[in-house]
Image: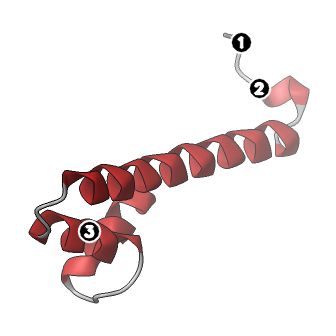
Amino acid sequence: MTTGIVAIAAYVVDQGLGSLILKALQSPLHTQFIGAGALAVALALAADAALALLQRLLVPRGLRTAR
C-alpha cells in the first residue's frame, strides 16, 4: 500500500516514480505509461518480498502460524 501511495503522491509533489506515470498519461505514447506502471508494480512486489523475508527471519519458529 505504501508504494502505491508514493506513486499517487506525485499529484502533490512532482517527483519520484509517480511523476513518470503522470507524464506518461499526458503523452500520446502508451509505452511510457506501461513502463512506468510496470516499474511501480515491480517496486511494490520487491518491497513485499523483502518485508516477507524480513518477517520470516525475525519471527521465531515457535511463534509462526501454521499454513
Label 1: few (<14), some (14–19) or many (≥20) C-alpha neighbours in 10 Å? few
Q: Mark 2 sits on what residue?
A: 64
In the displayed structure, would residue 10 be above or below residue 29?
below
Q: Which mark is residue 26?
A: none
* Residue ID at (51%, 47%): 42
Q: Nearer the viewer, residue 31 or 59?
A: 31
Can residue 12 be seen in the rendering of this structure?
Answer: yes
Q: Mark 1 sits on what residue?
A: 66
Amino acid type assigned to the residue bearing label 3 in the image: Ile
- Element on which disc 1 rests: loop
In the displayed structure, would residue 14 be above or below residue 48?
below
Can residue 1 be seen in the rendering of this structure?
Answer: no
Separation of disc 1 and disc 3 at Cα? 36 Å
* Residue ID at (30%, 77%): 19
Residue 24 spot, x, y in % from top left: 22, 66
In the displayed structure, would residue 6 be above or below residue 35?
below
